[in-house]
Structure formats: structure tokens, C-alpha cells
Image (tube, coloured by chain):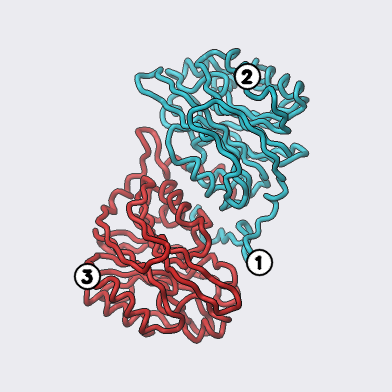
Chain colours: A red, B cyan
Amino acid sequence: MIVGLVQTAPQFGDRLANQKQIENLTADLDADLWIAPELALTGYEFRNRAEAMELAEEVPAGPTCVWLQDFCRDRNCLAVLGLSERDGDKVYNAAVLMSPEGLLGRYRKIHLFDAEKLRFDPGNLPFSVFDTGKARIGLMICFDWRFPEAARTLALRGAQIIAHPSNLVMPFCQKAMVTRALENNVFCATANRIGEERRTGRIMKFTGGSQIVAPDGEVLRSCACDATVAFILDIDPRQADNKKVGPYNNVHGDRRPEFYAP
Amino acid sequence: MIVGLVQTAPQFGDRLANQKQIENLTADLDADLWIAPELALTGYEFRNRAEAMELAEEVPAGPTCVWLQDFCRDRNCLAVLGLSERDGDKVYNAAVLMSPEGLLGRYRKIHLFDAEKLRFDPGNLPFSVFDTGKARIGLMICFDWRFPEAARTLALRGAQIIAHPSNLVMPFCQKAMVTRALENNVFCATANRIGEERRTGRIMKFTGGSQIVAPDGEVLRSCACDATVAFILDIDPRQADNKKVGPYNNVHGDRRPEFYAP
């Protein structure tokens, strides 16, 4: 299975330009699954909840999902991408898993970062794994990395690949995702953005370094911190079905939940 | 509070030589808490359960605890050290927390690594945190690193410092402990050993790199991979009481257990 990551530098509020950027970066590459960053077509730093709502869309009726389905149809692929999702008077930092036939999966960020708490409602859907036929894909977003329970839950629910759209500003996540891969023997694919935003009187500098980590902790491929880029990589998702570590251990089977704090 | 780590190269089965090694390495250093490796006075690679049992001791009546209490009394300190613990017909890969007055805490390794499963009984005591007056100390051993629930449970139970006696052979743990520190805002002190053992037809090569990681993920101090060494470091355990990350986040308070798989 060919997995592609696209690392972009979105222009705030310019959906069409950001679509074009993804189209251009991925134009010459064929993948079975593309993963794009968090809030990939809107930009990150909403000034407030009203602005997040204004740039939000219904899923899957809104223009981002319509465009993403076209993208999947044109290339006969699946795609994961982050967006601001409106649902009635609620607004979520969300991600979708799209196919040529339409929406396959949806996730609403459960662990909101920093001032996102002022802009978004906290996610209200379970950590879910979607069986696409080519791989079982789990979704989490950016700051969810800091909570081991996120990746653990997805892996225990059968994820072979954790698709992880991100807008990272702290330097720890890329290394921590190696730990997330190792502790679950699962592929972790983090699609991050680059560039800066200065919309609320502070500088948000995004760290790039998009990467795919193998279940054995090897960083199979990683991007620069300062370039827009896309890459593809051939992986076998079934590697993630083997939870063994050596002849005696199993990263899931050796768990002893009776000793764990709730 | 001064925390000391001692990184040794035990001689298999020679308790007195291994005691002497720890005494010599730490002789010129004063610490409030010393942390020594897993199975620090026996060596690691027992040929079988009978050998693990033969070198095991009762806690705290056995000679290792008696020596360790003397060590604590002589230096007016606390100490954590790994040993093979016999309890009736059971034998555990255990760690103790000792004070000048006697045993303060005990832990029996919950996640056994590799052929340890043939040699030891799995731990049957809760992950526990011991309030020593100077700091609240949680105990875990070596391969417990691979299971995020171990450090998480200790941190949720109030640990400020996770004392982590180890005999590491795989290269991942030292970096993963940075993640463990970050995801819990807790100090992680890994005391590892160096050297090789060739007692069962394979080579066990231990990786050293003992380290103390701060709650913010900074590796405050780390050792070489190939030298016996001790160091001391002044830390403020109360740093670990602050679980905030920026103005809006809290690594424990932001947990949403209703969404986590059991």
C-alpha cells in the first residue's frame, strides 16, 4: 500500500489557494492514501470562535469534503485531511477520511490544544478505526499525541495506520510519535504544516518534520522543517498486526489492565 | 533535593563485588536519593527459574536489603535498587525503596521482558507511590517503559519522581522516557547498567545511558553507554506537581477517560 504525506504552508482563509497547493504538491505522485495536515484548507490561528465557525463547514456537504471527494475520485485514492466542522451551533477541529465514493470516517479532536479551547467544542465522537479494505486506519489530530491513551485506544481498536493530521508548534511530537509506534506496534503517519501565522498578537511557528514511523520505531521517512513537500512510501499495513516483540512479548497481549489507573 | 544515579557493570552472582562497585562509584558524592540498576547485585541473565530463585532473597530480611539499609544509614539517604525477591515459592524481579530506618516501598515488575517470563513470577502488587517526605517516589522497572500505563498510573497516583532501575538491551527506552516525562509532567530517572552477559548462549549487551529527564522533557543529565559512573543532580520535585502546559492545558486534567479503551 502506498501512503503519501503532504506537508503544506496554508494561507489563512484562502481555501482555493490551499487546495491548489495540495494538488500541485501531489500532482506527480500516486498513493493509495494521502494524508494532509490539520485545518489544511483554512489555516490554524482563528481569532475567536466566531471566525472558526465562519470558516467551518458541514461534513460531508461542505466545499472541502466535496473537493476532497473529487481529489479521491481523480486519483482513485483515499485521503485524510483536517478541517473546521460545523454541526448546528457546535464547531469542531475535525478530520475526515474520504474515498472516491464519499465519506468513510470522521473524527473530532478530543484533546484541544491551548486557545483551541476558546474556539472549538471538544470532540464528542469515539476514537474510531475505519476498515478501508487496504488498511484499517485510525484518526487522531495533533495534540492528541501528548495523551498516550489516544494512540493506544486506536491501536487496541485495530488500527494498522494512525493518520495524524497536525499543526505542530512544539518540538516534542515527532520524537514522541516514535514512542507511540513502538508501544503499539503500529504505523504512525504525521502530516504537519510549516510556516508562520501572526493573527492574534503572537507568532505561531509550525515545525514541519512530517514523518511515517514503522511499528518497530524506525522513522521510515521524514520531511524538512521549512519546505512544502509531498512524498510517498510503500508500506505493508499487516506489519502492524504482529504485536510480538521477540519470542515472549506482545505489546498488547502483555498489558495488565487490572494494575492500571483508570 | 539531590538525586544520584549509579550506572554499574555487575559481575554475575558476585553480590559482594557488586556492592563494592556501588560503594566505590558513589563514595565521593552526597545524594538524598540514590537509584541503582535492576538486579543490581546479582546480574541479569539467570539460566532458569531455579537460578533466579537461588540468588533471590526475602525482602527486607535478605542480605541485599540489610546492606542497602546500612548504605542509607551511613549516608543518611534513601536508595532504590533492583533485586531478585523470594516470597515462599514465588520469585519476583523486584525493586525496593530503602531508608535509614528500613524498607519504605517495594515493587514487583509487572511487565516481564523476554525470557524473564521463564524465570520470574509476574508482579502482583499495585504500581505504588511512596511519600518519603522529600519527594513522592514511584517505582517501575526496565521494560515497564514500553507500556505507557505504567508511568501514567504512577503519575496519576502522585509520583513526582519515577525511579526506574533498568537492565536495558534495546535502544529505544532512553528516548521513550522523554515521552513518559512529557506526557505526565514528571521526573523520570532511569538507572541502567553496562557490559555484557553470555550465560545462555546469546549475548546480552546492556546500553547504559542512564539519565534524569525533567517534567518538561529536558534530559538534564545522561551517562555514556560504556562506562561505570555515578552522578548527582539537584532537582525540585515540586516541579512535577504542576501539570499545566501553557495557559490552557493540563496533561492530567485534560485527560478524557470516557473516550479511552480499557
Q: Chain of mark 2?
A: B
Q: Residue at x 41, y 50 (%)?
A: A181
Question: Is residue A105 in view from this perspective?
Answer: no
Tell me the residue that label 3 is attached to. A28
* Mark 3, secondary structure of its residue: loop
Dot in front, 3 or 2: 3
Tell me the residue that label 2 is attached to. B58
Q: Could you tell me the amino acid type at mark 3?
A: Asp
Q: Could you tell me the amino acid type at mark 2?
A: Glu
Q: Chain of mark 1?
A: B
Residue B29 lies, in percent from the top left, at: 70, 28
Tell me the residue that label 1 is attached to. B247
Whether residue A225 is situated above or below residue A184 in the rendered picture: below
* Mark 1, secondary structure of its residue: loop
Q: Which image quadrant: the N terminus of chain A?
A: bottom left
In the displayed image of the protein, which residue is found farthest to the front?
Answer: A226
* Mark 2, secondary structure of its residue: loop
Dot in front, 3 or 1: 3
Marks 3/2 same chain = no
Q: Residues within 10 Å of mark 3 (few under 14, many from 20)?
A: few
Q: Nearer the viewer, residue A168 or A224?
A: A224
Residues tagged 1 and 2 counted as in contact (Cβ below 8 A):
no
